[in-house]
Each structure stands twice: as structure tokens, then as C-alpha cells.
């Protein structure tokens, strides 16, 4: 287990170096975050000021939030596809501008929207089950469901990019890719980017510190600590969005015979794969 953790740390470092030469990739999560924030804020404003106070208000709110989820996942999927197109272009020596990548990603709008609808429905069902089953049972069911969704959808976006499949077929292809190369014992990939964790962890520490010091320090200093904590968390989220999605593309391309980018060690990938029951007989 410890060896897998070490491999996961080293693999994340290599992925980070593979991306570092193309700073444009970091703009995709920024654009995604800004658009997502706008969608949710606009949705909440519309719901608060436009929905009448009636017995059906809760249904309006639920429908509004659900539609916001669909739009957010639709935008996120298109921007992830654009980011993957940009990375492949950079890797092949043919730098692709953000505008060009977004234009190419628009060809996948229909599939991305279908995927956003299905993924939103799955998450909403999971949240409903979690909210209705209290205690440890709810936590266990939610954890199992989240893990199953994560594994089953691991290669969905790269699959949509390469095969232009609908959501159901994309999930089937993702699962097929996993089973054919890792077997049924696949339990995910140990991929831990300490660089990202430093930003996110430091941000949460600052937020906790501000909570403890509230009322004991001047407001200006408290505001500064809160702002610094929020900025660090946002930076961590930007890095995680970029590195995790590009890593999935790298692994997907490697599995499908497209090789690895310079600087990525295939032995680290094999060591970082986690198998249920510790079975490592499915290495490729």
C-alpha cells in the first residue's frame, strides 16, 4: 500500500511537469468556475425573486437547482473536452488556442448535454437516497454509490471525445476499457498530488484559524485570513481540475496504444493502480 502511495505521488509530479509547459490549460478550470458560479447565482436569484410562495414552491426550487446542475455539468464537460484537445495538440507539437479548442469542442455539444442530464439525474438520486437514510447506513450507501459512479465514469469524457458516444454507450465503453485492461478487480488509481493538497489544505487551515480567532483579532486581519484561505482553496481546485482530468486522458491514451508523454513512467502507472483484494495480476 505504501509503495502505491509513493508511486501515486511521483506519478502526480510527472503529470504536473507534463502540463507545466502549457499554461493555457489552467484557464479552462477558471472559465468553468466562473460560468458555474454565474449559473448558480443567477438560478438562486431567479428562484428567490420569481418563485411565488405556494405549496409548490419546493418543487420549483428542486427543478431550478436540477436545471442549474445540468447546465453546470454541460459547461464543465465541454470545457474538459476543449482542455483535452488543447493538451493533445500541445503534446503533438501543434499548439491549439483556447478559441480553436472551444470551437472544436462545440461539435460535442449534443453528447455533452446528454451526459450532463444523465450525470445530474444519477447524482440527484444518490443525494435523495443519502438524505432519506440517516446515520451510518446512509453514509455507507452514499460512499458505495459515489465509488461505483467514479469508477464507472472514469473514462467517460475521453470516450466521448474519441468516439462521440452518447452517455449510456460512453459509460459502457468506459467500464469495458477498465475491465479489459485492469480486470474486475480494478479499484481506482492512487493519484495524490501533494502540490495541490498543500494549497487546499493550507486554505482550510486558514479558514479554521479564522473561525477560532473571530472576535479576538481586528476585522481587517480576519478578512485577510479568510480571503487568503479562500484564494488558496480556489487555486487548489483549479490545479486539481486540470491535473486529474489530464491524467485520465493520459491513462486513456496509453491504454489505447497512443503511448505516454515524455517524462511519464509506465512503471509508476502500474504501481499506482489499486486492485480490490490486493490482486495485481492485471497489470498491463
Image (spheres, grey):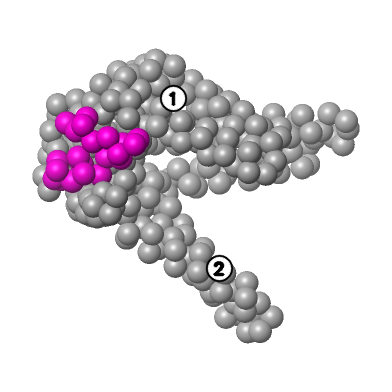
Query: For residue 270: magenta?
Result: yes
Q: Is residue 271 above or below residue 204?
A: above
CA distance separating discs 1 and 2: 35 Å
Examine the image and state in which quarter residue 246 appears. Answer: top left
Report x, y in % for residue 149. Answer: 46, 31
Between 76 and 194, the one nearer to me in the picture: 194
Examine the image and state in which quarter residue 88 appears. Answer: top left
Q: Residue at x 59, y 77 (%)?
A: 222
Q: Is residue 8 left or right of residue 125?
A: left
Classify mark 2: helix, strand or loop: helix
Examine the image and state in which quarter residue 132 appears. Answer: top right
Residue 84 visible in the picture: no
Classify mark 1: helix, strand or loop: helix
Q: Is residue 110 left or right of residue 121?
A: left
- Which numbered marker is on residue 207? 2
| Residue hosting label 1 | 112
Report x, y in % for residue 2. Answer: 28, 54
Q: Quadrant of the C terminus?
A: top left
Which badge, 1 or 2, is on the more N-terminal residue?
1
Q: Residue at x 56, y 74 (%)?
A: 209
> Over which residues does the magenta segment extend?
264-284
Amino acid at each position: 500500500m505504501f509503495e502505491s502511495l509513493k508511486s501515486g505521488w511521483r506519478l502526480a509530479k510527472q503529470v504536473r511537469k507534463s502540463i507545466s509547459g502549457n499554461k493555457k490549460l489552467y484557464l479552462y478550470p477558471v472559465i468553468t468556475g466562473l460560468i458555474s458560479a454565474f449559473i448558480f447565482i443567477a438560478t438562486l436569484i431567479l428562484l428567490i425573486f420569481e418563485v411565488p410562495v405556494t405549496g409548490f414552491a419546493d418543487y420549483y426550487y428542486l427543478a431550478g437547482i436540477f436545471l442549474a446542475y445540468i447546465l453546470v455539468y454541460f459547461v464543465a464537460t465541454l470545457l474538459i473536452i476543449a482542455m483535452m484537445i488543447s493538451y493533445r495538440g500541445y503534446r503533438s507539437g501543434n499548439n491549439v488556442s483556447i478559441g480553436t479548442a472551444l470551437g472544436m469542442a462545440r461539435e460535442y455539444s449534443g453528447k455533452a448535454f446528454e451526459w450532463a442530464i444523465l450525470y445530474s439525474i444519477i447524482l440527484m438520486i444518490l443525494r435523495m437516497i443519502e438524505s432519506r437514510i440517516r446515520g451510518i447506513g446512509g453514509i455507507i450507501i452514499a460512499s458505495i454509490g459515489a465509488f461505483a459512479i467514479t469508477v464507472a465514469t472514469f473514462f467517460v469524457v475521453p470516450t466521448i471525445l474519441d468516439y462521440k458516444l452518447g452517455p449510456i454507450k460512453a459509460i459502457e465503453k468506459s467500464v469495458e476499457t477498465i475491465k479489459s485492461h485492469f480486470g474486475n478487480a480494478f479499484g481506482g488509481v492512487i493519484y495524490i498530488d501533494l502540490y495541490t493538497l498543500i494549497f487546499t489544505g493550507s486554505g482550510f487551515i486558514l479558514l479554521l484559524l479564522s473561525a477560532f480567532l473571530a472576535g479576538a483579532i481586528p476585522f481587517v486581519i480576519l478578512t485577510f485570513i479568510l480571503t487568503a484561505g479562500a484564494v488558496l482553496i480556489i487555486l487548489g481546485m483549479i490545479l486539481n481540475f486540470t491535473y486529474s482530468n489530464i491524467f485520465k486522458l493520459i491513462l486513456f491514451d496509453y491504454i489505447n496504444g497512443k503511448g505516454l508523454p515524455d517524462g511519464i513512467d509506465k512503471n509508476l502507472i502500474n504501481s499506482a493502480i489499486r486492485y480490490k483484494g490486493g490482486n495485481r495480476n492485471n497489470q498491463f
